[in-house]
């Protein structure tokens, strides 16, 4: 007489997955089933299901809260970006561009330091920063390692170079290349906090402002 195949745990799991309605009408069976728990006494299947649902509800509420918070931050970022872009469009010269950036980046975005480097042979007066040296331009480009933007902690000398100063107390930065017609450079924002800008962060906002500058700067005169 042949033996019946032995049921395995996988067989039971598969059966219950294929027949989710199995326990309908079997209240007595459900109430008798006990599920061991590592941190306490065994509970009934119904109690365990309720506990799982409560845990999932807490998780879903947290996810919803996170989504709403992200949406709120995105709305704020959009409004700040909108004000900055309008100010850049209304600027009448490069000094006006510089002033619009300074007002927005320091007041709206709270950056500790920022700079816009211009790769040009023209003589620009402060606060505009002109980088005439071809070698320094190449050195700056090499920091990006072929990428449009970079973000994170860099050696102090590299941070100072991207900010156009001899030295800086900034510990982290985000930087994007400006690539326009007869208009190339770098836009950099920096923080004294080494954790404000991390290599894993998205530079979408900075890329966007750099694109606006690439289009806007060739349209207006220097001065």
Image (cartoon, rainbow, N blue to C red):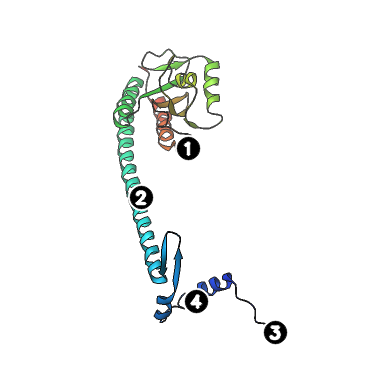
Q: Secondary structure at mark 3?
A: loop
Of tags 3 and 1, the one toward the viewer is 3
Work out whether 60 lies above or below 222.
below
Kindly identify which residue carries mark 4.
Answer: 19
Work out whether 209 lies above or below 61.
above
Marks 4 and 2 in Cβ contact (< 8 Å): no
Marks 4 and 3 in Cβ contact (< 8 Å): no
Which label is found at residue 200?
A: 1
Percent position (x, y) of residue 86? Answer: 31, 33
Q: Secondary structure at mark 4?
A: loop
Which label is found at residue 67?
A: 2
Q: CA distance from mark 2 to mark 1?
A: 20 Å
Residue placed most toward the observer, 76 or 184: 76
Q: CA distance from mark 4 to mark 2?
A: 35 Å
Percent position (x, y) of residue 2? Answer: 70, 84
Q: CA distance from mark 3 to mark 1?
A: 62 Å
Work out whether 73 lies above or below 61.
above
Q: Secondary structure at mark 1?
A: loop
Ranked by sequence position, the earlier of labels 2 and 3 is 3
**Residue at 37% from the left image edge and 53% from the top image edge:** 63
Residue placed most toward the observer, 181 or 204: 204
Which label is found at residue 2?
A: 3
**Residue at 48% from the left image edge and 32% from the top image edge:** 149
**Residue at 52% from the left image edge and 22% from the top image edge:** 140
């Amino acid at each position: 007489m042949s033996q019946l195949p032995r049921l395995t745990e996988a067989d039971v799991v598969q059966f219950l997955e294929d027949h989710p309605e199995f326990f309908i009408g079997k209240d007595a069976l459900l109430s008798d089933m006990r599920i061991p728990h590592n941190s306490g006494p065994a509970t009934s299947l119904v109690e365990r299901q309720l506990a799982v649902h409560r845990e999932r509800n807490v998780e879903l509420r947290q996810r919803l809260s996170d989504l709403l918070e992200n949406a709120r931050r995105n709305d704020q970022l959009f409004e700040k970006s909108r004000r900055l872009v309008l100010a850049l469009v209304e600027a009448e010269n490069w000094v006006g561009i510089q002033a619009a950036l300074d007002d927005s980046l320091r007041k709206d975005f709270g950056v500790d330091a920022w700079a816009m480097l211009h790769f040009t042979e023209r003589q620009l007066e402060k606060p505009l920063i002109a980088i005439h040296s071809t070698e320094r331009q190449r050195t700056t480009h090499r920091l990006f390692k072929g990428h449009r933007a970079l973000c994170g902690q860099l050696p102090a000398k590299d941070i100072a170079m991207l900010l156009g100063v001899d030295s800086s107390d900034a510990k982290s930065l985000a930087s994007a290349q400006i690539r326009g017609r007869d208009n190339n450079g770098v836009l950099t924002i920096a923080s004294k906090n080494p954790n404000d800008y991390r290599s894993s962060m998205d530079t979408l906002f900075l890329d966007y402002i750099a694109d606006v500058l690439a289009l806007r700067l060739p349209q207006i005169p220097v001065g």
